[in-house]
Image (cartoon, rainbow, N blue to C red):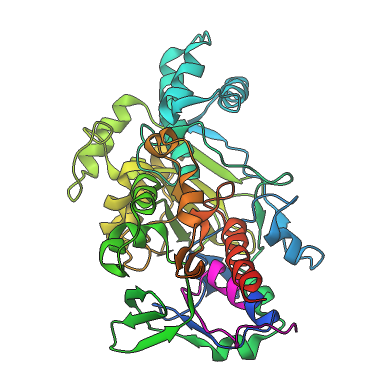
Amino acid sequence: MSIIGRNNPSVIIIGAGAAGIAAASRLYANGFEDITILEAGSRIGGRIHSVPFEGSYIDLGAQWCHGEKKNVVYELVNGLGILKEEDLSPKLYHSSSKVIEEAFQRRFLAVADDLDGAESLAQRIVERFQREVWEDEELVGECLEWLRKSALSYDGAFSWLNVSGCEDFEECEGEGHLSWNGLGYKTILKVLMSKFPDALESKLLLGKEVYQITWGDQVVVSCLDGTTYSADHVIVTPSLGVLKKCHKTLFHPELPLEKVIAIETLGFDAVGKIFLHFPNKWWDQNFTNINFVWSESDLKKSAEEFPCENFSVTQFQKGRSWVTGIFAIHTVLGSPNLLLAWASGEFVPEIETRTDQEIISGIEYVLHKFLGKRHSPDAIIRERWYSHPHFYGTYSFQTVKSQKLGRSQASVLSQPLLSAGEKPRVLFAGEATHAKYYSTVHGAIETGHREADRLIDFCK
C-alpha cells in the first residue's frame, strides 16, 4: 500500500455500482483510508443486479461481458474459468408460425451488419437497405421492423430517430457475448473487492439517498434521512438518468452550462428484460433463440388483444400492441427451465406498468402466434429500470443532438469541478462518462479507476 500526502484526504463516493466499487478499491489500494461510500439502495451493484434462482444466479441488469481484448472485466476474471461463450446468432420467425427461409435470413443479416454512417440510426439502416434489390419487399419491411427493435436494444433507446448514426462507441475485440454461466455478474464486484473485502464493506453505507451536494472549499453531502457527510472530494457515480432528473437541485452551486448541456443531450432510455420460468422445458437442445417478425395484419390483431393504455401514442405505437415490443427470447445458460425475453423501443415504459399476469398472458399469446403451440410461463422475474427512482433507465447512448455538438459529451461530463487552487472537488464516473465504452460495465469500471487515479495523482 503506497503512502499518500496531503494529510490523508477524505473521499465520499456516491453510488456502489461498478464505477463506485472500482474507485473505492483503487483508492484504498493506494493508501486512501478515509473513504465513505453512500449507496441509495439496499444492495451494491447498481445496474449489476444478480439474484439467486433455482441454485444459480440470473442477472436482472447487466448480462454479458462484451469482448475480450482491452476489456477490464475480461482481464479481471480471465483464467478463472467463469465466462462462457453464448451463441446469439438471431433466428428469425414469422408470425405466420413459419421459420423464415435460411437463405433470406443470411442475406438480410449480412446487410444489417454492413451499415454506413449517417445522421441517425434510422437513416443509417433504411438507406442501406434501399440500395438492395429484394424479391419479397413486404417481408423485408417486416424484418426491418424487427431490426429496428433489435438495434434499439443495443443502444437502450426508445426511438431510432434519436440515436446518432455516427457513434464513437468502440467494441472490444473477441467474443461479444460472454455469459457468467449461472454465477452472475456480481462476480466482478467480488473480484474488485477481493483484496480488501472487509475494509471496503466497513466503508459502505446503504439506504443513503443523496439529495444535495454542496461544494466549495469542502464538500458536504446531504441525505434524505437527515444525515450529512463532509469530505475533501466526492466522486459522483449515479446513472445519467438520475443526473437528468436531479442535476438542477442536486448540486450547489449548480453545474456549469457545458456540463448541463452534456447531461441533457446525451441519451438515456431503457430496455426490458423479463425472465420466464416454465414448469417444463418444452424446447429441445437445438433451440437457442427466437426473434419475432410480425406481419402487418398480425400487428393489428395483437393491438386488439393487448391494447396500449398507459403510454402516449407515437407513430410506431399507433395501432400496435405492447406485446410487439418484445422482439426476442433466448435460452439462459445455467438455468434449464428459464427463457429470457427482451423488449425495446417505445413500448418499454408501457411494459413496465403491466402486471406479471398480463406479461404471462402476452408471452403465451406471442409464443402461440409464432410457434403454433401454447406455452405459458408459471412465473416471471424482472426489474423495472425505467421507472426505478435510483436509475430511470438502463444505459446511455449518443443522440443526434449530442453528436452534432462536436466534442464528445461523455468527455465533457467526465471533467471534474475544481475549487480554488485547481483542486478536484467533485469528480464524475459511471458508464455515461466514458467516451468509447459508454453503456458497458467495463466502461463503468474504467471510469471508476480513472477518477481514483485523478485523486491519487493530485494527492501525491
Q: If the image is split into quadrants, where does the N terminus sit? A: bottom right
Q: Quadrant of residue 159?
A: top left
Q: Is 86 positioned to the left or the right of 222 in the image?
A: right
Where residue 249 appears, as percent x and y from the top left, is 25, 67
Q: Nearer the viewer, residue 276 or 22?
A: 22
Q: Is residue 287 visible in the rendered structure shown here? A: yes
Above or below 406: residue 433 = below
Where residue 282 appears, as percent x and y from the top left, is 54, 53
Q: Total marks drawn?
A: 0
Where residue 100 appears, as percent x and y from the top left, is 53, 26
Rendered residue at 40%/46% (across/down): 266
Q: Quadrant of residue 19?
A: bottom right
Q: Is 435 positioned to the left or the right of 391 in the image?
A: right
Segment tinted magenta in the rendering: 1-24
Q: Quadrant of residue 216?
A: bottom left
Rendered residue at 72%/57% (across/down): 84
Q: Residue furthest right?
A: 79
Above or below 136: residue 96 = below
Q: If the image is split into quadrants, where does the C terminus sit? A: bottom right
Q: Nearer the viewer, residue 429 or 297?
A: 429
Q: Nearer the viewer, residue 207 or 244?
A: 244
Where residue 174 appears, as percent x and y from the top left, is 74, 45
Q: Is 10 positioned to the left or the right of 390 in the image?
A: right
Q: Residue 170: within the magenta?
A: no
Q: Is residue 392 visible in the rendered structure shown here? A: no
Q: Residue 2: within the magenta?
A: yes
Rendered residue at 43%/26% (across/down): 119
